[in-house]
Amino acid sequence: MPIAAPLLLSALMFAAGVYGVLVRRHGVMLLISVELMINAANLNLITFSQLLRDPVGNILVLFIIAVTAAEVGIGIAIVMMLYRQRSTVAVDDLQLMKW
Amino acid sequence: MIIRAIAFWALAGLTALSTIFVVTTRNVVHAALALAATLLGAAGLFILFGAEFIGLAQILIYVGAVVILFLFGIMLTSTSPGRPVVDNDQRWLALLVSAGVFVVLATGILAAYGSRPLRLTVAFSTNALGNAVFTKWILPFEAVSVLLLAALVGAIVLARKD
Amino acid sequence: MVSGGIRQIAYLIPILPISAFFLIVFFGKKTPGKGAPIGILFTGTAFLIGLGCFADAISRGGIVEKSVTWINFPTFHLELGIRVDGLASMMFVVVCLVSLLVQIYSLGYMHGDVRYTWYYAMLNLFTGSMLVLVIANNLVQMLVGWELVGVCSYLLIGHWFEEKENSDAAIKAFLTTRTGDLGFDVGIFVLIVGAGTANIGVLQSRVAAGSVSTLVITAGAILLFAGAVGKSAQFPLHVWLPDAMAGPTPVSALIHAATMVTAGVYMVARIYGLFSASHAALAVISVIASITMLMAAVLACVQRDIKRVLAYSTVSQLGYMMAALSVGAGVAGVFHLWTHAFFKALLFLGSGSVIHAVHSNDMHEMGGLRKYMPITYGTFIIGSLALAGVPPFAGFWSKDEIVASAYTSGHKLVFVAALITAFLTAFYMARACTLTFFGDYRRRATAGDDHAHLPHESPRSMTTPLLILAVLSVVAGFVGIPGHNVFEKWVPVGHPHEGGFVAWIAAMSILIAISGIALGWRMYRGAAFGFGVVDPLERLGPLYRAALRRFYIDDLYLAAIVRPVQYGLSNFVYKVLDQKVVDGAVNGAALATVELGKAIRTTDERGVDGVVNGFAWLTNKLSFGLRRVQTGNVQRYAVGLFVGVVIVAAVLIGGLR
């Protein structure tokens, strides 16, 4: 397979993640979209790790996964707090900083 | 080789479709599940590319825990009847922007690599990874541990009822 | 021309009184004596220097002339200079002495006056101005002094300006002399243009050399004489002098007897070379002088105010002096000026003493004062005898010389006029003395004044000058006794002139004088003027009435000149020119400025403020527009963020390729 293939796939995943971040109103959906973007990065790293035959990529991905897990945990906690405060999960209802 | 090619394209296709599904479906739960599928596909690709440990770790952590976490979040914040919580009104703008992102990235990729083939030659053993982590990368490892602890504590504090 | 000697510093003589003026003005009030001692001191010093000059002129003769060039014009140069000959030195003595005596006299007379210090300042300014006139070596400088004495006269006549009558008299004096000064100014111009110089010496020598046209000489002389007509109160500009008696009596003694009024005579004598070269001018002078001396003498006979008598007498005597100059007897004229200064000043100061004691100028309220004021009485009689021309008093010698000269030079008109005037002079002085000093005291009748205090003699500050002047009235004439006439040598005027004594004329003069006195004495002796008793002269009917109205000359002037100017010209100038044109222009300028101000304000408000406010408005609108970016919607922000990412990535990747 061409090298470009997995890379393009990761680009697609990343773009989809961008779309999701910009479009989705549900707070959890935002987090999911962010997950997608991170995974695209992971895929990129693994691909290059294989291409360059260097385990560094793997190690980095390991750490990324760990960090991501922590981030999701916090993110869900925040969404839940938000839901408790405002009884809404839609992020575009949160416009207190409007002019 | 050909099995690898087939495996690759199949997994890639799965991942791609799932990705699209994640960001386009109206049902949040479906989106979470599609995410799980995407992650599985990605894990498969990891294993294909010789990162066996990472691939399994992905399945364990991502698919097994993170997605569950998402589902919990969705469940605990299911809204009262009202406006269904799906997309906002900047869809076309977002489409444009993400298309732009994709185009830029693709241009870069294709310009850099064109159609050079990828030879799958290496498989990284867990042993080697473990050695590297606990010697060369010990500091980030410890830092991540602390981070996980902080996240744990933080999540509990944030999500408390009072 | 001689040089050296004390006459070199003669310029100090005018400078001293003028310095006194400034000192008194600035410091007078603060010094003890309120400025009077300063004046007396400075004038006294000037007198001493003047005496020295006179002595030097007597001993060495000649002329000391020094000058500095002030402005150099292409055709002539304007100078500041002194010309000290016998004539000028004599005038120094006269002016300074009389001024000094007047200032001493004023210590008593003006004691407690409301403007005492200013009075002394003015007296000194006047003295200095007169001396500037006297000492000048050129006509322009003389004009400066001439005008200055006019101003001082105005200020001094109007010393008690709270009374409208006094300020009116001052204005009348000033305007009348100004009228004559017009001629004087034009005359100076004519001479400068026609003869090319204003310097007195150069002018006379050019006239003598024949390098000046007859027209210029005659015109210049007559025009200059016009100034003298005004200043020396000759007909027809004599009208101011009687009214000038409104000023304090010492002022009258100084200015209107001895000095300022003699300026005209002095000027003619000074430039005698010019006048004697024009027969026309001399004829004009003699006619006017004759009219003046006669008319004034007649008017003096009908006055009730003692000072008015003396004023008309002065006019008449000035006519004598002018007449003398016009018949070629310059020395005689100046000699009369010399003697007249002393006895007329004496008479005025004496009258001041009387007025001071009786608090009235009206002779009908006097009488018998010889009992109460012996010194005043004695000196006044001496002065009167001198004026009447009784030997051996001073006036006889000078008057007689004039009469004789008129006869010997063939001027019949002047001769006859002089004789008649002599008679009248004796008459009116006798009348005045009789009314004032003889008979019973007709005290002033004021309501509730039954214990009116009797008049008493004046203080020593007043009687001492009287005594000094009385002595002078006796001896001053002796310097001109025919046969021993040293005055002629001391004060040469024109060509030396013999023939000033004709025996039968002298005898006739004495006879005329005595008969005049006798008539006056008889008519007024024992006169008891009270209510209803009239002056015996009223028997003359219409002539008397006309004389009382001053021969209607003042009325003529008032109707023909004063009123038309006052109501006609002045009104026009005021209402039209000043109010409409000048004020219109000024107000117009003000209006224009206001409009300009308004326009500027509009520009400022609309323009400048508009720009400033515009900026604010613009900023406001911009900010209103721009703040809508802040939607509060995070995903919107994210759009921006990713757009930026795309752009940066594109640039980087593009750059890498």
Image: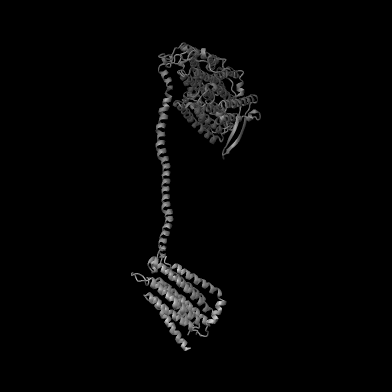
Q: Is residue C260 left or right of residue C600?
A: right
The image shows residue C602, relative to residue B146, as above or below, that is above
Q: Is residue C454 something that shows in the picture?
A: yes
**Outermost residue, bottom direction?**
B2
In this view of the protein, which residue sits in the foreground, C80 or C355?
C355
- Tell me what residue is drawn at x 45 percent, y 67 percent: B157
| Quadrant for the N terminus of chain C in the image | top right
Q: Is residue C654 something that shows in the picture?
A: no
* Colour logic: one colour
In this view of the protein, which residue sits in the foreground, B104 or A96?
A96
Q: Position of residue C555 (x, y in %)?
A: 41, 25
Q: Position of residue C551 (x, y in %)?
A: 43, 22
Q: Position of residue C602 (x, y in %)?
A: 41, 51
**Outermost residue, left direction?**
B81
Q: Position of residue C326 (x, y in %)?
A: 53, 24
Number of numbered markers: 0
